[in-house]
Image (cartoon, helix red, strand yellow):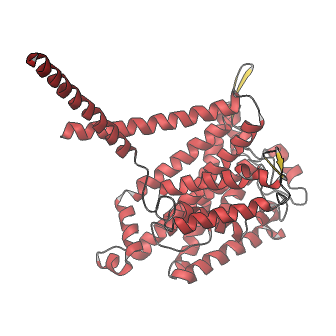
């Protein structure tokens, strides 16, 4: 019995590893070896943005779905992470051209410093990873500071307080008094983007932007999954289900809420930094409350309390809104038949209807609170394999019995 369980678990692990390997191979092929067609040119940004929003949805689901805290400050923490990342990765020689109206207070670039030590390619990659961690930590620090007054509120009051924080952060980052760091209301640019993730092998350059993004998102989501399945995760779920019962069992409500808030903000900061890398420029005015609502909508579509649902919904949402339904704005059906009411903006109408249908027929989201289990898939394959083994001897016995009767 024990050996069978071990085989099931191992099969699930092998399936997960194979799936990840295939995704990573696809990322390398898309960036380097597949021809640049209209299909691949649309597929790459959709996959990249979908992966970023998957991380953002998971970070929000940790807070809203697994802890039961209705927070709407995600855009604020994304803004902090994105700006911190951009500020510490702009090459020193580019500061004067970026901060045209201010005297830049930050005159170093972490990827540039490491590139001078261990080489441009590896130095840039390691420097970007360190910068992403710093961006997440600064966002977590802000979460720690505002967590003390905010987390004592509940329900709608918490949502209003965190939403107000996000709007205040957006206004402060556009304040000219911080122009030496944030560049005021102007864009931050010329920092290291996804296209800068590459390794040179003589005359051949291996682009690693999509692969780098997928690996970072995979690691972050895996860390959230490990947290949810730990004793802290079980405590967070207990708080979500019944705060009074959780406190009666000895769970510190404020402590665990603070842990969830800080961790969620850390990954939101990392997600904001990745979004800055994807967009190649960053400006505070873009991080409005509508961005938080969009992420919350993806969480609801995927299923509140489901990591798998958040990931599926993010890719589905981005693919539908920015690619699959694009033909509705072009005035024709796939360029073949002219349709009078297909015009600019009609895509948003159809997309809104699709979302309404999903919400109406999947009230708990696509996945509800369930997860895609590789262990379950592995167990199913093992059972099918064992069933075939049992069927084969039985068939042989029937055949031998028939021959004996003849």
Residue 194 visible from this viewpoint = yes
Q: Nearer the viewer, residue 93 or 261?
A: 261
Q: Nearer the viewer, residue 90 or 349?
A: 349
Q: Nearer the viewer, residue 164 or 137?
A: 164
Picture quarter containing residue 178?
A: bottom right
Residue occupying the point 43% across, 54% down: 371
Residue occupying the point 60% across, 33% down: 26
Q: Quadrant of the C terminus?
A: top left
Q: Position of residue 261 (x, y in %)?
A: 52, 68
In the rendered image, the vertical position of residue 198 relative to residue 48, given as above or below: above
Q: Position of residue 147 (x, y in %)?
A: 54, 74
In the rendered image, the vertical position of residue 398 relative to residue 368, given as above or below: above
Q: Position of residue 400 (x, y in %)?
A: 14, 19
Q: Residue furthest left?
A: 405
Picture quarter containing residue 295?
A: bottom right
Q: What number of labels is visible?
A: 0
Q: Nearer the viewer, residue 364 or 240?
A: 364
In the rendered image, the vertical position of residue 82 relative to residue 250, given as above or below: above
Q: Residue furthest front?
A: 406
Residue occupying the point 69% across, 35% down: 115
Picture quarter containing residue 168?
A: bottom right
Residue 118 visible from this viewpoint = no
Q: Quadrant of the N terminus?
A: top left
Q: Position of residue 214 (x, y in %)?
A: 59, 42
């Amino acid at each position: 019995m024990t050996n069978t369980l071990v085989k099931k678990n191992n099969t699930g692990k092998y399936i997960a590893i194979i799936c990840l390997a295939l995704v990573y191979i696809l990322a390398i092929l898309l960036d380097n070896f597949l021809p640049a067609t209209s299909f691949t040119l649309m597929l790459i940004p959709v996959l990249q943005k979908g992966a970023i929003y998957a991380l953002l949805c998971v970070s929000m689901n940790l807070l809203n779905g697994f802890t039961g805290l209705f927070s709407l400050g995600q855009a604020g923490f994304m803004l902090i992470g994105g700006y911190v990342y951009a500020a510490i990765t702009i090459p020193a020689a580019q500061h004067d051209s970026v901060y045209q109206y201010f005297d830049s207070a930050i005159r170093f670039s972490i990827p540039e410093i490491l590139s001078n030590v261990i080489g441009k390619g590896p130095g840039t990659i390691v420097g970007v990873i360190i910068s992403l961690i710093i961006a997440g930590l600064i966002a977590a620090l802000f979460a720690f500071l505002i967590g003390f007054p905010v987390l004592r509120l509940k329900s709608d009051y918490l949502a209003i307080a965190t939403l107000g924080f996000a709007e205040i952060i957006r206004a402060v980052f556009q304040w000219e008094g911080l122009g030496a760091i944030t560049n005021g209301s102007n864009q931050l640019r010329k920092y290291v983007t996804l296209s800068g993730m590459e390794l040179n092998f003589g005359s051949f350059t291996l682009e690693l932007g999509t692969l780098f993004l997928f690996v970072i998102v995979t690691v972050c989501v895996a860390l959230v999954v490990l947290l949810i399945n730990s004793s802290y995760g079980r405590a967070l779920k207990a708080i979500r289900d019944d705060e009074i019962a959780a406190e009666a069992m000895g769970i510190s409500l404020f402590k665990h809420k603070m842990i969830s808030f800080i961790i969620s903000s850390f990954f939101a900061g990392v997600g904001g930094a990745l979004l800055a890398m994807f967009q190649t420029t960053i400006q505070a005015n873009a991080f409005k409350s509508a961005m938080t609502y969009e992420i919350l909508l993806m969480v609801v579509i995927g299923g509140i309390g489901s990591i798998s649902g958040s990931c599926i919904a993010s890719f589905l949402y981005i693919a539908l809104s920015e690619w699959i339904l694009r033909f509705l704005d072009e005035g024709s059906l796939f360029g073949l038949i002219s349709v009078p009411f297909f015009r600019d903006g009609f895509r948003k109408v159809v997309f809104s209807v699709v979302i309404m249908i999903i919400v109406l027929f999947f009230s708990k989201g696509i996945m509800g609170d369930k997860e895609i289990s590789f262990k379950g898939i592995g167990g199913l394959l093992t059972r099918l394999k064992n069933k075939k083994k049992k069927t084969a001897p039985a068939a042989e016995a029937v055949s031998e019995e028939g021959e004996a009767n003849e």
